[in-house]
Amino acid sequence: MQLPNRGARIVVIAGVLAVSVLFRFSFAADMPLLQATAVYGVISTDPVYLAIAQEKGFFKKNGLDISLTHIPTNQAMQALIGGRIHFTTVGPQVVEASLAGADTVYIMGVINSFVLSMYAKPENASVKALSGKTIGATNKGTPTDFAARLILKQNGLVPDTDVKFAYLKEIPALVAALKEGIIDAAMLSAPSTLTARNFGLKELVNITAQKIPYAQHSIATTKSYIAANQDIVRRFVRAAAEALDYTRNNRAEVLPVMSKFTKITDPALLNEALDAYEKAWERIPMPSQPAIEAVLGSSDNPKAKAAKWDQFVDDRFMKELVASGMFR
C-alpha cells in the first residue's frame, strides 16, 4: 500500500518512533535496580556528596539501589573485609588492612590532602610555644594524629617527648577540652573551626592551605567484590563522581541536604564547612600516589617499606570516566 503523500509518511514514522521511545522508557522503568550497601564512616562534611547521590537521585539514575548507612570507619573496614558491606569511606585504613592480608582497595580518592587546622589557647603565639604541653587528636593513626606530628616536627618539636598527645575520639570533644583548658592545642576540621574561633581560640596553622598529601577521605571496596560485581562498582563510581561534581558546584541546593545529613542547622557553620571542603574535594577524584605514599610513610607496619602505592588501588573505573570526557 502506498501512502498518499509525504506528510502522511512523516506522521507514520513519528508514530513509530514515539512508540519505540515509550517502549524503551517502560522497559527501563521495569528494570530492577542493582542493590549494594555503602557506608560513610564519619558524620561530617567529607562524605556529604554520598547523601547528595542518594537525595538527588544519582544512584538511581545509574541503576542502583544503595542502602546508605553510618558505621564508624574502623568497624566499617571490618564489615567490608567480612563481606557484610560493599563500599565504605576510608582514610589510611585500606593500607593497614591490605598490609595485614585483606584484599581492600581504594577505588576513588576524594580528598587527597589534609582538611585540618591546628587551634590553641590564645596565649600560645606559635607552634613552638606548645613545648611541654598537650595537643589533642581524635585517635592514634588517624589524619588528625599524623598531621599533628608532621606540624610539630616541622617546628622542631619531638612528638610524645616535647609535646604529649591526648586522644579524645571526636572533634567536638577536642573543642570542648581546648575551651576548658584540659588540653593546650587541638587538631580541628570545619565547621568546628568556627566554633573554636567563637570561643576565642586561635588558629596556629591552617594545614588545609598547605595541601599536604594524605589519603584523608577515599572510597574503598574489595578486589573480590570487584571481580564478582564489576558493573555495580562501575555504576557506583560514576554516581559518586557525578554527585561530587554537583556538590562542589551547587551550594544552594547542597546546604539543605547537608543540614539534614550532619544535623547542623546553623547556616554559618554549614558555610564554614563548605568553604573548606569545596577547596579540598578533588575535581577528578582519582586515588593519589603522593597521598597513599604518605600513608605508607607513616605506617608502623614493617611491610610498608617494601610496598608500592598502586598495590592498594584499583582505579580502572575512574580512568574510564576520565577517558569518557566526564571531567572536561
Image: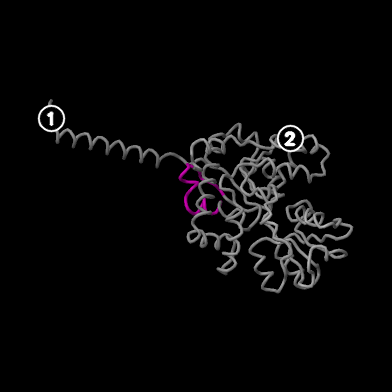
Q: Which residue lies furthest to the right in this view?
A: 161
Could you tell me if the residues under marks 2 and 1 are in contact, i.e. CB atoms within 8 Å? Answer: no
> Is 228 above or below relative to 56?
above
Measured as percent of width and height from the top left, residue 127 is found at: 79, 63
Mark 1 residue crowding within 10 angstroms, few (<14) / some (14–19) / many (20+) = few
Circle 1 sits in a helix, a strand or a loop, which is it?
loop
Dot placed on the residue nearer the N-terminal end, 2 or 1? 1
Q: Name the residue under label 2.
A: 308
Residue under the image location 65 percent in, 48 percent down: 112
Per the rendering, the mark at residue 283 is: none
> Which residue occupies the foreground of this view, 182 or 41?
182
Measured as percent of width and height from the top left, residue 137 is found at: 77, 59
Q: Mark 1 points at which residue?
A: 3
Measured as percent of width and height from the top left, residue 270 is found at: 57, 64
Q: Residue furthest left?
A: 4
Residue under the image location 66 percent in, 56 percent down: 209
Circle 2 sits in a helix, a strand or a loop, which is it?
loop
Residue under the image location 68 percent in, 70 percent down: 197
Magenta stretch: residue 54 in it?
Answer: yes
User: Please, what is the three-letter code of the amino acid marked with disc 2?
Assistant: Lys
Q: In which quarter of the image is the N terminus?
A: top left
